[in-house]
Image (cartoon, rainbow, N blue to C red):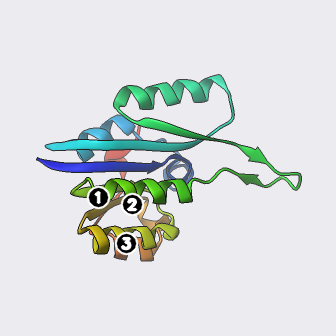
Amino acid sequence: MESVTILVDVQNVYYTIKQAYNRNFDYNKFWAKATEHRRVVKAFAYATDRGDEKQRQFQNILKAIGFEVKLKPFIQRADGSAKGDWDVGITLDGIEYAAQSDRVILVSGDGDFDLLAKKITTDFQCKVEVYGVQELTADSLINAATEFFPIEAELLLN
């Protein structure tokens, strides 16, 4: 049975799907597809924490599905911009768990992860699946992936 590690960039998924479809990602359907006939080594969902109840409920849903939820505090800067990205954390976990997995599944359209995908495939001979909104996923990431799966209607909540 193939082993997989799943890395979900929650903020990227939320905003790209909202922009493209004005809907939400169906984490249950994704989990069923990504883990079918596979053994999960680790599954992380990386998110920012604003401390509100609705967000806590969402995090509990992710945990019930099988994700370990990693949180970073949401930081609002004085100029109105915000910070809370998980690029380094996702990269470190991707490298650590690629050595234990046949495949790493990355859910993000962020082009910064093309280097991670290349490193995993080259250094660990590990396949990299990327799920992202087609028109909002960096071409460099799509090209670096072993396989790309566009997030479309079947992976969205109604």
Say whether marks 3 and 2 touch (CB < 8 Å). yes
Q: Which amino acid is tagged 1?
A: Ala
Please report contact status of discs 3 and 1: CB closer than 8 Å, yes or no. Answer: no
Residue 121 drawn at (x, y percent)? 29, 70
What's under tag 3, amino acid-wise? Lys
Marks 1 and 2, how far apart in space? 7 Å
Would residue 34 be seen by someone viewing this image from the given angle? yes
Relative depth, front residue between 61 and 2: 2
Residue nearer the viewer, 80 or 117: 117
Q: CA distance from mark 3 to mark 1?
A: 11 Å
Quadrant housing residue 105: bottom left
Name the mark on residue 87. none
Residue 27's quadrant in the figure? top left
> Where does label 2 land, which residue?
95
Mark 2: few/some/many CA within 10 Å (<14, 14-19, 20+): some
The answer to whether residue 71 is above or below residue 149 is: above
Q: Judge the density around disc 3: few (<14), some (14-19), many (≥20) Cα neighbours within 10 Å.
A: some
Q: Dots 1 and 2: beta carbons under 8 Å? A: yes
| Left or right: 59 in relation to 33 | right
Residue occupied by mark 3: 119
Q: Name the residue beneath numbered marker 1.
A: 99
Answer yes or no: is residue 158 visible: no
Mark toward the viewer: 3 or 1? 1
Q: Residue at x 37, y 68 (%)?
A: 117
**Label 2 is placed on what type of residue?**
Ile
| Residue displayed at 55% across by 59% down | 88
